[in-house]
Amino acid sequence: MATQPDVSQIIAGPGLIFVAAVGTAQPSLASLPVTFNNPWYQVGYTDAGIDLVYTPTIKEVYVDEEAAVVLDILEKEKFVVQAHLAEVNVQNLSLGISACTLAAQAISVGSLPLNYIAVGVTGPAPNGNTRVCLLSKAITTVAVSMKITRKDKQVIPVSWDARKLSGTPLLTITDVGTGYENS
């Protein structure tokens, strides 16, 4: 069935990133506005947007009698939240380094236990609603570099890889305000 173009389905606008300890209760998605209560906290301004990337690894299965693929098997899947944090404080810096401890205004790095966090991202959805992406458990697995220069601001690049928690999906993406979030 053909559909007509619908400008209400085109969305643009900034997102917000929230983090909390793994196991923290997720916000209610029953209605707008979505509120991330304490101990969730917002990481502040970002630069160049927030990227949400899902990458499946699919194994194609062939049989002798057919030239085409007859079955697909999901071997692996990966979901990543990437951003550049524009608020360059030590708390945000600790979010980008997986093996560190934060005490007051100091970070200790190296040969420390890995830190996992819960991550929430909100942004615009069609028809003026709010899209919420929730990761129950995530870890950063990439290099963190900060460029110190007089010509531009510093940013903290972060990349959080979702991890599976038993009994929960890898992540959820919900458009809140549609009336379908509770079905």
Image (tube, grey):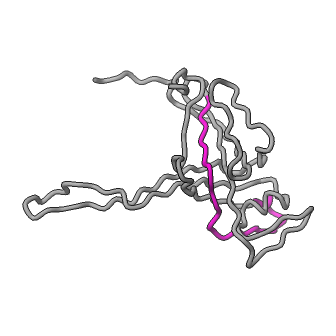
User: Magenta stretch containing residue 5, yes or no?
Assistant: no
**Residue, x 72% and y 71% (percent of image)?**
113
Residue projecting furthest to the right: 104
Percent of width and height locating residue 138: 62, 57
User: Which residues, given as a range, are shown in magenta?
Assistant: 130-155
Compared to residue 163, the image places residue 15 above or below, namely above
**Residue, x 77% and y 69% (percent of image)?**
100
Q: Quadrant of the N terminus?
A: top left
Compared to residue 46, the image places residue 13 above or below, namely above
Residue projecting furthest to the front: 167
Percent of width and height locating residue 152: 79, 60
Compared to residue 1, the image places residue 73 above or below, namely below
Picture quarter containing residue 109? bottom right
Of residues 40 and 5, the one drawn nearer to the viewer in this rendering: 40
Percent of width and height locating residue 157: 69, 61
Classify residue 171 as left or right of residue 117. left
Classify residue 44 as left or right of residue 22. right
Total labels: the figure holds 0
Classify residue 130 as left or right of residue 100. left
Residue projecting furthest to the bottom: 111
User: Magenta stretch containing residue 131, yes or no?
Assistant: yes
Of residues 134 and 89, the one drawn nearer to the viewer in this rendering: 134
Of residues 127 and 178, the one drawn nearer to the viewer in this rendering: 178
Picture quarter containing residue 146? bottom right
Percent of width and height locating residue 86: 77, 53
**Residue, x 62% and y 49% (percent of image)?**
136
**Residue, x 57% and y 57% (percent of image)?**
163
